[in-house]
Amino acid sequence: MEDNKNFTARLLSATPQDGSTSGESSSPPPLLSRLKRNLTCKAGWSEVSGSLGDLGTFIPIVIALTLVNGLDLGTTLIFTGLYNVVTGILWGVPMPVQPMKSIAAVAISEGEHLAIPEIMAAGICTAGILFVLGVTGLMGFCYRWIPLPVVRGVQLSQGLSFAFTAVKYIRQNQNFVSGKSEGDRPWVGWDGLVLALVCFCFIVLVTGSGDGNGESQGGVGNGDSATDSRIPNRYLRIVNSIPSALIVFLAGIAICIVRDPEILKQLKLGPSKIHVVKISKDDWKTGFIRAAIPQIPLSVLNSVIAVCKLSTDLFPQKVVTATSVSASVGLMNLVGCWFGAMPVCHGAGGLAGQYRFGARSGASVVFLGTAKMVLGLLLGSSLVKILTQFPVGLLGVLLFFSGVELAMASRDMNTKQDSFVMLVCAAVSLTGSSAALGFGCGISLYVLLKLRELNCDNCMQIFHSTRRKSLETMA
């Protein structure tokens, strides 16, 4: 229950972090101190750029659910924006709010599409299970005992899956309604290969391999002159300050308007009408069986376990527990799904993408959440008309870097045995398209390898020694 206590302490703590007592007049109120600490903008415009790092997954799924299933985009933007603001304040890290991918995949799959009540039922069922796992401390127990190589395998498979999807977005035209590719993308055009490749090269030139500070590059050289080492560092600091994802996103918005100038006339001011979704008994049954069951293991592994581990790797000074994240996913959907908001979770891929493009604090997602709420209140569901014109190739570029950043989290496997477990877990997850299947294989393999390491001779020696002592005692 340690994680449960940490979560409660973070929500209700009244002790300042600087060691002073709460009775001292010079100490700021704990809530204000926490807000200042979690919302301090550490990287300027890079924080704004980083907030857009997970749009490569957010926008395509939102478009598909809106066009195919009739999702209320305005309501979704308002609620997901609110979630962004709250999580940014709570944790002080760029914790993403992303669609539940398995539910979305089932909802828009070929055959009989899920209705909105069925989608919301699936989200509520998944959320209820995660909330119970969180508040009871079971999720924290799982997080502590799951082997790191297995977690890295899940992260590697999810990252590579994002990267593969991104390459498909870049190379081929996409129909998000049908979920299929429609031929090769032309080289020239407002959504051509040349545009995507230019943006790709631009991001590489600005962000490099994702180090963010240029230390690895800036230190390269002969080492004979301190001046020589300072010049590339100064240059890289300037380049790293360029908000690459923000520039690419704004370029995409400009292209939307150029491609269809009439789109601005189709926008309507005012929010969508929020109403309570009526869910029947059949909706609960269909939503749980078809969508919630495949979503639950993915949410546990990627939305809680993997995202907590990645957050610890990227922000070791911040406390993000499996208990709090699991409870957060539960609360978000237990509230929002009743009003028709898209089922959402926290994803390791989104966190990796936002970090890759410069997000370093809760201020990043607070900005994103505020923007979502403003757009949802001002334009409502009419905003989908702009999103459908957004260049898919640019979304693919953003998604590619997010996937690679997530996959690179697995580079800390220092032994061949750990790497073996990780790669087997990732391979099974990718081949079977199931994180749960890969997780099960990874756990089984890890246990087998540990059993193999047992020294039978030592076991026999311990047995004989214990038996001899027992006989001596009896004598």
Image (cartoon, grey):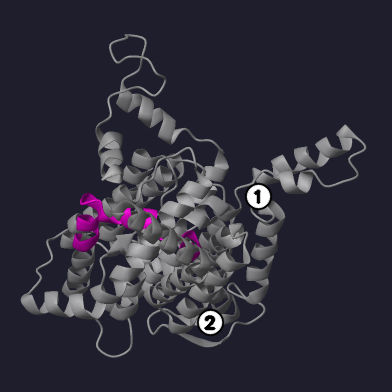
Residue picked out by circle 2: 173
Left or right: residue 9 compared with residue 397:
left
Decide whether residue 354 is among the magenta residues.
no
Residue at horizontal 35 percent and vertical 22 percent from the top? 16
Q: Where is 226 relative to 15, above or below? A: below
Q: Say what amino acid the circle numbered 2 marks.
A: Asn
- Whether residue 468 appears in this view of the structure is yes
Q: How many marks?
A: 2
Residue at the extreme left? 281
Residue picked out by circle 1: 211
Q: Nearer the viewer, residue 299 or 85?
A: 299
Q: Report x, y in % for residue 10.
A: 30, 36
Q: Nearer the viewer, residue 28 or 191?
A: 28
- Whether residue 143 appears in this view of the structure is no
Q: Where is 333 relative to 176, above or below? A: above
Left or right: residue 118 compared with residue 427:
left
- Tell me where the magenta segment starts and ends, as one range: 128-151
Q: Report x, y in % for residue 154.
A: 46, 67
Dot 2 surroundings within 10 Å: few (below 14), some, or many (20 or more)?
many
Left or right: residue 65 compared with residue 240:
left
Ranked by sequence position, the earlier of labels 1 and 2 is: 2
Residue at horizontal 66 percent and vertical 77 percent from the top? 188
Q: Quadrant of residue 342?
A: bottom left
Q: Quadrant of the C terminus?
A: bottom left
Q: Report x, y in % for residue 28.
A: 35, 17
Residue at horizontal 42 percent and vertical 20 percent from the top? 18
Please report contact status of discs 1 and 2: CB closer than 8 Å, yes or no: no
Q: Report x, y in % for residue 369.
A: 37, 48
